[in-house]
Amino acid sequence: MAKVSRYYDVKRDKNGNRYLEVYVSGFLLQRIPLLNKSTAFTHEERRLLELEGLVPAHIASLEEQKERVYRRYRLQDNDIEKHIYLRNLQDRNEVLFYAILADHLEEMLPIIYTPTVGEAVRIFSHIYRLPRGLALSTDNIDQADQAFANVPLDDVRLVVATDSSAILGIGDQGFGGMAISIGKLSIYTGGGGVAPDKTLPIELDVGTDREDLLQDPLYLGVRHRRLHGEPYYEFMDKFVKAFKKRYPKAILQWEDFSKEAAFTLLERYRHELPSFNDDIQGTGAVAWAGILGAMRVKQEKATEQRYVVYGAGAGGIGVAWAILEGLKREGLSHEEALRRVFVLDSKGLLLSNRNMEEYKRPFAHDPSWIEGWQYSGKAPGLIEVIKNAKATVILGLSGQAGSFNEPVVKAVCENTDRPVVFPLSNPTSAAEALPEDIIRWTDGKAIIATGSPFDPVEYKGKKYEIGQGNNAFIFPGLGFGAILSHAREVTDGMVLAASYALADYVSDDHIAQGMVYPYVREMNEASVRVAARVIKQALEDGVAQTKRFDGLSEYDICDYVRKHFWKPEYLPYVKG
């Protein structure tokens, strides 16, 4: 087994119990968040590791420590202060951070990730405290090998990398996007079982086109305009080459790239190293899982619906892809499926006789398919598509707040008794509609899921739970399954398998409440099921580089995944 870090190694005693052999001591040990137990070091550890006098006399349990930090957390004035508090805790004591996150996942997920992380990204350079992750920039990309060598973690298996060009719904954020990579990996560990010492956030700093950032004296990124074209891809080639050399077993998640770069990078490298784009594939998988849940609520077939995807960026095209592939899996031909999926960008319905980016073209309709439609302009707009196509499902990935207004939602109601309305754009401020409005406009008949968290809605004496179509139900299990199967590639089949695993995890109790997704507090078990199905699909697709799972049932694979979930607990230390 590879050594985990140059500072410590994980070993087992003769009884199979895990412990840490550490190669640092005293003050330095306390400054390494993966090793720092703070007040929980035992008397023996304090003596062996030169900690006497450096910590208070009382030996605190992890439970005591959690109570102390949670009290302080609740005293923070607002969500961004809570975010900063948790990030500071993570930079002091990683085990304690994940222990408190595990206890309060539903409460804290919106703090460490969307929607609060959007504000943290905006002000990242102003709240910067301690370095975390790897920062590759135009200043040091030619020294990428040395930069990777400087990372003290030797067995990284999961990397989230961003160039910060399309952060959530707020666009180019320069170096601030590092907060996204950090937040995503916190979910991989807190909700998906990947050990924190197996993860690495990476910021690919290729500049920014934001004049306010370039003029900000506190801005931490390189101060020039973004690379584009060939220089941009030369930068990425150098990054990928150094990445593969340093971490040949790692899975790479591409995160928050501009829509043009997102599709190009995915196709450029997906067969070269195991990688996926969460904005495209994760969003698509979670949306299709929600649609399958909605069909259980409606008691209808997915192949009977007509779908409108509003927004043709990375997320929108990812959702269109997942619906198309899902409908084909449910029995439709490619053309039959395509005729039921209507994708709109800012110019209206995608039609094959229009000029458009290449990544949109597979989802464009032949103009002959809409002969007889009533519409104004060169292409039908949102409400025109809903009426002419007789849409029963609408999904928002436009980032345009309020675009699913009352006339739009009521137009869907004309086509079905139970409209499916998913305003999936993040953060909360970018949602296409608010759940309480949708419920009122449809008299409680709509089946709703959102991208960001919303509180339950009370309407006419009934409580409506709002399911969250959060990619966090997909990517942790997808990544962990790829790690455990030693996948040499993350296939489309593995992505779709993750979607069906999540849909199957949704229970009859969820459905009875009108929920098409589990509660966030169930994320760990959902991730187990997703990872197991991904492993099984990797075997079927011939990309798994291990025979460990040959002949095992899905139940046995789930059991294996659970046993390998990292848990936030203090291990005994010995001095190396």
Image (cartoon, helix red, strand yellow):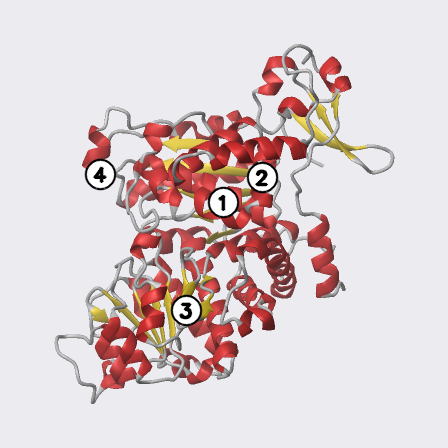
What residue is pinned by disc 1? Answer: 108
The label shown at residue 74 is none
Residue found 27% across the figure and 39% down from its top:
227
- Observer-nearest residue: 491 or 504? 504
Residue 487 seen: no
Judging by the rendered image, the residue that carries numbered circle 2 is 100
- Given residues 88 and 12, the one toward you in this image is 88
Q: Please report whichever mark, 4 or 1, sits nearer to the chain's N-terminal start.
A: 1
Going from N to C along the chain, the mark reached first, 3 or 4, is 4
Whether residues under marks 3 and 1 lie with C-beta atoms below 8 angstroms apart, the answer is no
Callout in the foreground (4, 2): 2
Q: Nearer the viewer, mark 4 or mark 1?
A: 1
Q: Quadrant of residue 405?
A: bottom left
CA distance separating discs 3 and 4: 35 Å
- CB under 8 Å between discs 1 and 2: yes
Label 3 and label 2: CA atoms lie apart by: 30 Å
Earlier residue among tags 3 and 1:
1
The amino acid type of the residue labelled 4 equals Arg
The secondary element bearing badge 1 is classed as helix
Give the Cα distance between marks 3 and 1: 23 Å
Q: Residues at badges 3 and 4 in contact (C-beta under 8 Å)?
A: no
The residue that disc 3 covers is 448
Outermost residue, front direction? 461
Q: Which quadrant, please, contains the C terminus?
A: top right
Mark 4 → mark 1, Cα distance in angstroms? 30 Å
For the N terminus, the image quarter is: top right
Q: Which mark is residue 210?
A: 4
Local packing at callout 1 (Cα closer than 10 Å; few below 14, some 14-19, many 20+) is some
Indicate the secondary structure of the residue bearing disc 4.
loop
